[in-house]
Structure formats: structure tokens, C-alpha cells
Image (cartoon, rainbow, N blue to C red):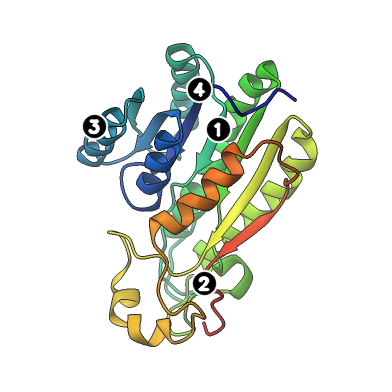
Amino acid sequence: MESMAGRDRVAVVTGGGRGIGRGCALELADRGCDIALVDLIPEDLDKTRAEIEALGRRCLSFEADVQDHARAKEIIAEVGSELGSVDILFNNAGRSMPTGIREITEEEFDSAIGINLKGVFNYIQPVVPLMDRQGRGRIINMSSVNAHTGGVTSAVSRFAYTSAKAGVLGLTKALAKELGPHILVNAICPGIIKTERSNDMIRAREKELVRGITLGRPGTPADVAQVVAFLALSDPCFITGQDITIDGFQWVI
């Protein structure tokens, strides 16, 4: 496996316009990566792209829905052509859906699976041939502590989101076996992370929720970014097929 160190690398970050995606994209750029951002909100893309370019790195940005398989294929091909490779894929894009089994519609359930699970597949499938040709690659998938616990709080059901995030863990482990040893595939499972998109329930219950976190605070995008950068750039790396929890040891849910 060719070394991931000592060279310019190219990272694709879905959901990279704000929040955790933005934080990870900036961290990777600061460590020497060129970045391709995928997001739905053009204003967020423009702002984050400017921040990355201010760090002296190349950046492409794409307004796209991760549920669009054909568009994902086009984006990965363009990144490979314009930036020369795709060394890192961070499948960050996702959306929570606080709807219980009694209320959720079929369309809402399909959307939760489409964004949080199929969106991961959509970007992995076209990137694998590029990484195969390069003889190297790192894929990092966004899951959640919900995949282990069943939800952040018993007061609000997120069973569709949780189902999708658990699926991401299965996909990660299966693909780590299929794609190893030259492509490493891992997942991260953040807990309570404060971002622009933190939902009202978390903000309203922050003091209560923090009491159940050993480190005494919610996480930040920077906390997640350190782990993503480690998985993306460490060389050598003997970690694949793993899900790494980033929650400050959250013992009350």
C-alpha cells in the first residue's frame, strides 16, 4: 500500500458546507489536503470554499443531493480529473428525523434511509475504482452513537435515522473486509455535538444532557475533526472496519 504521508492528498467531504463537515474539511485542508465539498446550500459551500482557499489549498464545490447516484458518479469523476486523485472520502452528509413509528410516512422513512445510508453507498461505489488504481484510499463514514444506544433521548424517537446509522456500521465492516488491505474503511459515532444544525431538543436540554457526559460538555466539530484527520492521514495505520465513538463518554442517554 502506497504511503498516505508526504504528499498532497485529495479529500471529498459530503455535507461539507457547515457543521461537522466544514470543521473536518478545514482540518484536512490545514494538514495539506485539497478538498472537494458536496452540500445542498450554495451559500455554505461558497463560505467554506473561501476558507479552504485562504489556507492555500485547492477546493472544488458541488451543490448536490447525496441521494442522487448519477450525480455522485459525475462528481467523483470530476474531482479525479481536476484534482488528480481521490485519496480520502468522508461521508458526512446526513439528516435526523424525530418521527416515531406511529407517525412516520413511507416517504419520510425512505428519505431517512436515502440520505443517511444510500448516500454513503452512492459516493463509495464510484470512488472505489479510483482508489483501486491508486493502490490506496481511506473511507470514513458518519454513523452515530444512536446506532448503539437507540437514540439520544427516550423522549423523542429517531428510529428511521437510527436504523440508517446502524446500517452504516454494517456497510463499513463489510466493505473493510471487501476492500482491504489497500483501502481502509472506518466509521465514526459522534454523540452530542454542537453545530449550527443542532436541533431544538438538544439546545433546550443542554444542561441536562451535559450532566450525562463524563467530560462535562458537548462536543464540537473540532473534536470530531481530530479523529477524522487521524483516520484519514495516519501512516502507517492498522485500523479498519472499526466504529469509533466520539461522545466524551456519554453515560446517560
Real-space Cα separation, disc 3 to disc 4, in angstroms: 19 Å
Q: Which mark is residue 50?
A: 3
Q: Residues within 10 Å of mark 3 (few under 14, many from 20)?
A: some
Q: Where does residue 158 sit, x and y in percent of width and height?
A: 48, 70
Which residue position holds label 2? 248
Can you tell which mark lies on residue 8?
A: 4
The residue to which callout 1 is attached is 88
**Residue type of the residue flagged with mark 4:** Asp
Q: Where's residue 69, x and y in %?
A: 50, 31
Lower sequence index among marks 1 and 4: 4
In space, the residues marked 1 and 4 are separated at their CA atoms by: 11 Å
* Residue located at (38% from left, 38% from top): 65
Tag 2 and tag 4, C-beta contact below 8 Å: no
Looking at the image, tell me whether mark 2 or mark 4 is earlier in sequence order: 4
Q: Residue at x 74, y 42 (%)?
A: 176
What is the quadrant of the N terminus in the image? top right
Q: Check disc 1 and give the amino acid type.
A: Ile
Tell me the element at label 1. strand
Res 184 → quadrant: top right
